[in-house]
Image (spheres, rainbow, N blue to C red):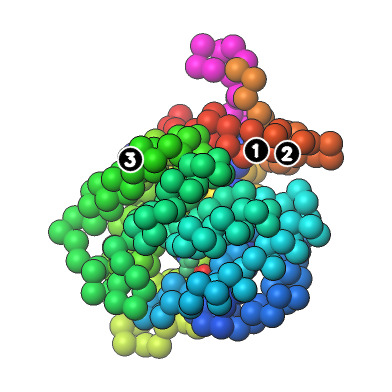
């Protein structure tokens, strides 16, 4: 991070739990491919404190090949539908680059489309999301996973990623996606070498300065397997990277990230609770008042950091307002 420490103006950094319904994701491929296993895992992550669930049916690990549309639909839609029924309060995101999958998942209960291609993989995606009126996560991306690492070429990674992400932001807004429903993501590990990921982590404030909530997704990625290891040594295996992941989640929260996308929800919540507690010691959560001191009606958070209104009795509309309220997701520097 550069400059002073920043934090979300309201509330805490949210935790998005990963449910990969794939045979080949790098850290959990195959474990949650059966629908029942994926649904049970999603419910487990919610019980551990996930604020959102991200359901995906396509592995995007470097070198991965794409499933067919039908395969992806068959993996994702029954899981979204079952989770939306079993946990009607859960905020479900669908991790897909295909408009047809996004449309079916939203019909089944998803409220956010997480598109790692930022609208580049499917020309129908941005207009579809605009029409559906759901949340949209646009990630920095330079091409499909099969050969994306050949595109990890930057003169200056941070300004280049910010510039390319700003282009996707502008395309999303031009397609009619409401600005308060747009979330940006620097795309760690996608066409990026370890040094690129570290530069983006160190300068996450510049991504946040693009003016939208930022999703940070470092969980168990390869560069975390190499950190602290001697040159030439085997990297830590993916399921031994959760402590390193939690450390990056703390960095992201301090920088003002909106949410972190992680496999280990419980450990992440513990780590982010530490951030929350340290903020509490310096005066509690920031006020929801406007800069001139008048209340603006924006949602606040309860003492434990839960967004107000997420308790029983909250309507869909209220919840949408809480999760997408522009001020709730406005981040800035103190
Ligand atoms: N990374 C993966 C999958 N989906 N979505 C967003 N928005 N950002 C990411 O960095 C991202 C993603 C790959 O990780 P996984 O195989 O563990 O899900």
Which label number is shown at residue 320? Answer: 1
Which residue shows up at 75% across the image and 75% down it? 36
Q: Secondary structure at mark 3?
A: helix
Residue 137: % across, % down: 47, 50
**Could you say which quadrant of the image residue 191 lies in?**
bottom left
> Is residue 284 inside the magenta stretch?
yes
Report the front residue among 174 and 214.
174
- Mark 3 and mark 2: span between their CA atoms? 28 Å
Circle 2 residue: 316
Residue under the image location 61 percent in, 59 percent down:
105
Mark 3 within 8 Å of ligand 1, using the beta carbon: no
Q: Secondary structure at mark 1?
A: helix
Residue 177 covered by magenta stretch: no
Residue 49 percent location from the top left of the image: 72, 55
SS for tag 2? Answer: helix
Residue at 66% over, 77% down: 32
The reply to whether residue 265 is visible in this rendering is: no
- For the record, the magenta segment spans 283-295
Find residue 289 and report its image quarter.
top right
Position of residue 26 measured from the top left corner of the image (x, y, whole percent): 49, 79
According to the picture, the residue beneath numbered tag 3 turns out to be: 170
User: Measured from the top left, where is residue 232 in percent x and y?
Assistant: 31, 87
């Amino acid at each position: 991070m550069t400059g002073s420490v920043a934090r979300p103006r309201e509330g805490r950094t949210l935790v998005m739990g990963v449910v990969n319904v794939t045979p080949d994701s790098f850290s959990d491929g195959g474990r949650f491919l059966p629908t029942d296993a994926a649904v049970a895992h999603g419910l487990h992550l919610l019980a551990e404190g996930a604020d959102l669930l991200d359901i995906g049916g396509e592995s995007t690990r470097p070198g991965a090949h794409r499933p067919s549309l039908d395969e992806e639909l068959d993996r994702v839609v029954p899981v979204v539908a079952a989770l939306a029924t079993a946990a009607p309060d859960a905020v479900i995101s669908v991790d897909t680059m295909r408009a047809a999958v996004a449309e079916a998942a939203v019909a089944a209960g998803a409220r956010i489309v997480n598109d790692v291609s930022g609208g580049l993989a499917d020309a129908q995606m941005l207009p579809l999301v605009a029409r559906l009126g759901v949340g949209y996560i646009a990630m920095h991306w330079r091409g499909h996973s099969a050969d994306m690492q050949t595109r990890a070429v930057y003169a200056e990674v941070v300004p280049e990623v910010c510039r390319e992400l700003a282009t996707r932001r502008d395309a999303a807004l031009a397609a009619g996606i409401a600005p308060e429903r747009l979330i940006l993501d620097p795309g760690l590990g996608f066409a990026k070498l370890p040094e690129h990921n570290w530069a983006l982590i160190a300068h996450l404030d510049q991504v946040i300065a693009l003016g939208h909530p930022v999703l940070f997704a470092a969980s168990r990625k390869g560069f975390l397997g190499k950190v602290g290891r001697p040159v030439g040594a085997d990297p830590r295996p993916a399921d031994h990277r959760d402590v390193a992941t939690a450390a990056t989640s703390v960095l992201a929260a301090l920088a003002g990230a909106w949410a972190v996308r992680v496999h280990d929800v419980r450990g992440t919540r513990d780590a982010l609770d530490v951030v929350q507690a340290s903020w509490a010691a310096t005066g509690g959560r920031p006020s929801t008042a406007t800069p001139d001191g008048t209340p603006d009606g924006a949602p606040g958070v309860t003492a434990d950091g839960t967004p107000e209104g997420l308790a029983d009795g909250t309507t869909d509309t209220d919840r949408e307002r809480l999760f997408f309220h522009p001020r709730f997701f406005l981040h800035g520097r103190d």
